[in-house]
Amino acid sequence: WYPAKYDKTHDISVVGVFDISRRLSLSSAFVYATGNAVTFPSGKYELNSKVIPYFTERNGYRMPSYHRMDISLKIKGKEGKKFKTSWDISAYNVYNRYNAYSIYFRENDNMPGVMEAVKLSLFGIVPAFTFNISF
């Protein structure tokens, strides 16, 4: 028995929307999840001058926890007879956390023969401006 790849002990999202006025609203979302179960090498050995990773336990490790906060300000335009408009100003990952997308291993440049874990992240903060038309 071993934990499934997508096993997350905790996975929570909290969303809040505050209507400031008839045309203006502010929303926020906080997302938190414990890391997925992963299999990392626990050692290595060399065979015919080739480095081979050694694995002991399937999905025995966890990725770092994932969390971010998003905010959005929506400004509704004047309603016409044929269509409605609105502007959205938002930011994904407001506090600019570089969540781990994956972790890979490489040989340390300063210490040959020593492997190091390297975290690969995709996004920091992502601002967005959106104009919506509905009819």
Image (spheres, grey):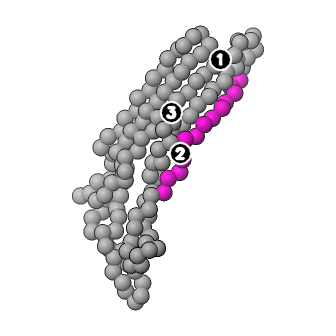
The alpha-carbon separation of the residues under discs 2 and 1 comes to: 28 Å
Q: Position of residue 64 (x, y in %)?
A: 37, 51
N-term-proximal mark, 2 vs 1: 1
Residue receiving disc 1 = 76
On screen, residue 112 versus residue 22, left or right, reads left
The alpha-carbon separation of the residues under discs 3 and 2 comes to: 12 Å
Q: How many marks?
A: 3
Q: Amino acid at mark 2?
A: Gly
Farthest left residue? 1
The residue that appears at 42% across and 36% down in the rendered structure is: 31
Residue receiving disc 3 = 70
Count neighbours of disc 1 (C-alpha within 10 A) and say few if under 14, some if 14 to 19, many if 20 or more. some
Residue 57 visible: yes
Number of the label disc, if any, that sits on residue 124: 2
Q: Secondary structure at mark 2?
A: loop
Q: Position of residue 6 (x, y in %)?
A: 37, 50
Specify start and end residues of the magenta stretch as a single range: 120-133
Q: Are marks 3 and 2 in contact (CB under 8 Å)?
A: no
Q: Secondary structure at mark 1?
A: strand
The residue that appears at 56% across and 34% down in the rendered structure is: 91
Using the image, determine if residue 109 lies above or below residue 13. below
Can you tell which quarter of the image residue 75 is in? top right
N-term-proximal mark, 3 vs 1: 3
For the stretch drawn in magenta, what is the main secondary structure? strand
Residue 134 visible: no
Query: Mark 2 against mark 1, which lies toward the viewer?
Result: 2
The residue that appears at 33% across and 80% down in the rendered structure is: 45
The alpha-carbon separation of the residues under discs 3 and 1 comes to: 20 Å
Number of the label disc, if any, that sits on residue 61: none
